[in-house]
Image (spheres, rainbow, N blue to C red):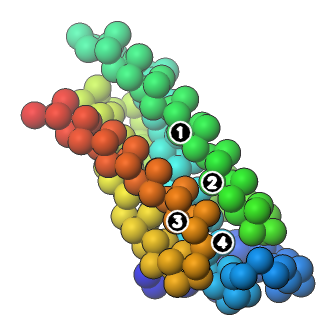
């Protein structure tokens, strides 16, 4: 949980949190809780966007005997992630905060490492699996914060995303056996 709380002090998010403090809202979520929820969602957005980019990169560059299957699978996954990124960003906006959207912000907030070069096909699968597992861990860090804030909309979004990331990670693990 420290990673999410540390985001409040993160230089990259400083203007976001300043704006939150300047624009109070009264929807039943305390200001301090809203800041923590936005920080957690911002990290989850960065993880999701980074995983989207990585999956799309692998879709373009996969080679080998499983090319057709992996190329199609990566396309399904990056398309789904693209939709998710929008949902997460709009949840942040619903909390009246600007959503991070630059490469610099995402690089500072993500827990998913950038891939180096073009890995072999099964290493791509492993990296995407690890990315989905990272998203699961990030979601689980945000859950108690959103729960404490009584933020059911964020909890619902996180639950839906967790189900999908866990299922995708399971399917990817199955490919690696």
Q: Secondary structure at mark 3?
A: helix
Q: Do the residues bearing badges 2 and 1 touch, measured as CB atoms within 8 Å?
A: no
Residue ID at (59%, 82%): 149
Tag 2 residue: 88
Residue ID at (34%, 20%): 70
Tag 3 residue: 155
Residue ID at (46%, 72%): 143
In the rendered structure, the answer to whether residue 159 lies left or right of residue 168 reads right
- Quadrant location, the N terminus: bottom left
- Judge whether 76 appears above or below 155 on screen: above
Q: Nearer the viewer, mark 1 or mark 3?
A: 3
Looking at this rendering, what residue extends furthest in the right direction? 22
Inter-mark Cα distance, 3 to 2: 12 Å
Residue ID at (29%, 26%): 121
Q: Do the residues bearing badges 4 and 2 touch, measured as CB atoms within 8 Å?
A: no
Tag 4 residue: 38
Inter-mark Cα distance, 1 to 4: 19 Å
Locate residue 98: give its quadrant.
Answer: bottom right
Q: Residues within 10 Å of mark 3 (few under 14, many from 20)?
A: some
Q: Residues within 10 Å of mark 4 (few under 14, many from 20)?
A: many
Tag 1 residue: 81
In the rendered structure, the answer to whether residue 147 lies left or right of residue 41 reads left
Q: If you read the primary sequence from the N terminus, does the residue marked by circle 2 or circle 1 appear first?
A: 1
């Amino acid at each position: 949980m420290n990673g999410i709380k540390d985001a409040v002090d993160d230089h990259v998010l400083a203007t976001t949190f300043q704006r939150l403090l300047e624009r109070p809202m009264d929807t039943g979520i305390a200001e301090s809780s809203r800041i923590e929820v936005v920080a957690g969602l911002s990290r989850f957005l960065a993880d999701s966007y980074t995983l989207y980019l990585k999956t799309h990169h692998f879709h373009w560059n996969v080679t080998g005997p499983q090319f057709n299957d992996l190329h199609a699978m990566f396309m399904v996954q990056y398309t789904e992630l693209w939709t998710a990124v929008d949902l997460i960003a709009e949840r942040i906006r619903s909390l009246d905060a600007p959503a991070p959207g630059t490469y610099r912000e995402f690089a500072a907030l993500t827990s998913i490492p950038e891939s180096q070069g073009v890995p072999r096909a099964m290493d791509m699968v492993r990296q995407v699996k690890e990315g989905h597992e990272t998203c699961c861990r990030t979601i689980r860090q945000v859950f108690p914060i959103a729960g404490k804030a009584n933020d059911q909309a964020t909890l619902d979004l996180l639950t839906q995303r967790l189900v999908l990331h866990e299922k995708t990670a399971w399917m990817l693990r199955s490919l690696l056996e």
